[in-house]
């Protein structure tokens, strides 16, 4: 199926010269992909254990949202900020977690500009500026690729330099990594026509998207996971060399959980196929908030996910993935001694290992 709607144009909409340029005003055409509803999480025991202990995020709800795809024409991509410009002005909502001042100051730099070839095909944007982060790739790139493939996208992809696991996700998604434009930091790139999807800018991070769920299920099937694969594993995700939110005694916690029959996994040491197969066999997953926890998207419905959430970075992004995939969630608040909100600060207190082992035993009793 060809993107016939790419040929259609919307009438220009008037705007004040001083108004920020947005995707809505810059796009030649916009298509609505999906409307998401607000959902409560599925929590183990409705978020309260028999002894009165409560899960984090009990009152959280996902954000209702309309997800869109935009056609941008004659634009420039600033690779370092991953922001598009049109007519020399930044399209402000293509900035994902970037400094507003940096975005406002962004201009086209002719000395860094790579011109568009005369016969350049339609291109598709599919990654954000944290492209090496596993969570960002799974949450932003994989659903984008799924939608492009589902619609029979005939063009090429705008990509970063790829790691082997990223190449594998492209192939599993039905794309040839060689049919792309590889972009590099410090450069700017001119494009004649670009498909830009809301997932790329993290718009759906806290919304329950059925298309994202279908994307993960499709990759699981293409990786060769059979329906009804037995769920036999309890998995602890070790963060290994990750420096953000480091907890000094994680190794000791891993050792304690190994005695509880947990399989200790450092996901970054495995290829994408191995990660998909491993987590599809999980009946329980435990780990600290981090990119590796995104592997819950490969789990089967009903799997219990216990996330160790640091007090200084209470982010429900993994919780949202569990809602999408029909998993049972438990958020265990970890006292770190860090009182200022930060996604990088090292914990000043160690894990309370006896308490966590006790809590995980409690949760394991609800495995079905």
Image (cartoon, rainbow, N blue to C red):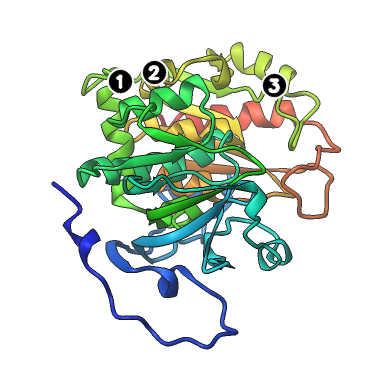
Q: Can residue 325 be seen in this view?
A: no
Q: How far apart are marks 3 and 1 (CA)?
A: 31 Å
- Residue at horizontal 38 percent and vertical 64 percent from the top: 38
How many numbered discs sit on the rendered protein?
3
Labels 3 and 1: the sequence-earlier one: 1
Residue that badge 2 annotates: 273
Mark on residue 253? 3
Q: Distance between the residues labelled 2 and 3?
A: 27 Å
- Residue at horizontal 35 percent and vertical 31 percent from the top: 179
Instruction: Please state the horizontal and vertical placement of residue 195, each as a whole percent of the image.
Output: 36, 54
Is disc 1 placed on a helix, strand or loop?
loop
Instruction: Please state the horizontal and vertical placement of residue 340, each as a whole percent of the image.
Output: 82, 55
Is disc 2 placed on a helix, strand or loop?
helix
Vertical side of 241 occupied by 110: above or below = below
Labels 1 and 2: the sequence-earlier one: 1
Instruction: Please state the horizontal and vertical placement of residue 82, each as a whole percent of the image.
Output: 57, 51
Q: Nearer the viewer, residue 86 or 294?
A: 86
- Residue at horizontal 49 percent and vertical 47 percent from the top: 319
Q: Can residue 76 be seen in this view?
A: yes
95 sits left or right of 313 in the view = left
Instruction: Please state the horizontal and vertical placement of residue 215, each as a whole percent of the image.
Output: 31, 39
Quarter of the image with the C terminus is: top left
Q: Nearer the viewer, residue 217 or 157?
A: 157
Of the two numbered discs 3 and 1 in the rendering, the one whose residue sits closer to the viewer: 1
Residue that badge 1 annotates: 223
Q: How far apart are marks 1 and 2 (CA)?
A: 6 Å
Of the two numbered discs 2 and 3 in the rendering, the one whose residue sits closer to the viewer: 2
Pointer 1 with pointer 2, Cβ within 8 A: yes
- Residue at horizontal 47 percent and vertical 86 percent from the top: 15
């Amino acid at each position: 199926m060809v993107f016939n709607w790419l040929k259609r144009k919307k009438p220009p909409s008037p705007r004040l010269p001083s108004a920020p340029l947005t995707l809505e005003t810059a796009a030649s055409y916009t298509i609505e992909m999906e409307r998401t509803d607000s959902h409560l999480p599925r929590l183990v025991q409705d978020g309260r254990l028999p002894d009165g202990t409560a899960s984090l995020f009990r009152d959280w709800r996902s954000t209702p949202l309309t997800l869109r795809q935009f056609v941008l024409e004659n634009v420039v991509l600033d690779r370092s900020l991953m922001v598009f410009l049109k007519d020399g002005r930044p399209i402000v909502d293509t900035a994902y977690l970037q400094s507003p001042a940096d975005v406002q100051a962004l201009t086209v730099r002719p000395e860094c500009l790579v011109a568009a070839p005369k016969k350049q095909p339609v291109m598709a944007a599919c990654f954000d500026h944290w492209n090496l982060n596993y969570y960002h790739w799974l949450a932003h790139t994989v659903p984008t690729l799924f939608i492009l493939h589902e619609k029979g996208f005939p063009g090429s992809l705008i990509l970063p330099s790829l790691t082997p696991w990223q190449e594998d996700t492209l192939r599993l998604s039905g794309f040839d990594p060689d049919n792309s434009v590889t972009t590099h930091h410090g450069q700017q790139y001119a494009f004649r026509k670009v498909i830009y999807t809301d997932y790329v800018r993290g718009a759906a991070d806290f919304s329950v998207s059925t298309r994202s769920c279908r994307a993960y299920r499709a990759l699981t099937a293409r990786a060769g996971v059979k329906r009804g694969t037995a769920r036999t594993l309890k998995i602890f995700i070790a963060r290994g060399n990750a420096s953000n939110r480091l907890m000094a005694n994680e190794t000791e916690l891993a050792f304690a959980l190994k005695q509880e029959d947990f399989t200790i996994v450092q996901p970054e040491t495995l290829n994408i196929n191995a990660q998909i197969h491993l987590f599809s066999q999980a009946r329980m997953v435990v780990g600290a908030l981090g990119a590796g926890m995104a592997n819950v998207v490969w789990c089967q419905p009903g799997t219990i996910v216990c996330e160790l959430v640091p007090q200084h970075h209470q982010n429900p992004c993994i919780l949202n993935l569990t809602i999408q995939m029909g998993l049972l969630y438990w958020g265990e608040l970890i006292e770190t001694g860090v009182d200022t909100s930060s996604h990088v600060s090292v914990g000043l207190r160690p894990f309370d290992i006896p308490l966590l082992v006790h809590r995980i035993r409690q949760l394991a009793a609800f495995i079905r």
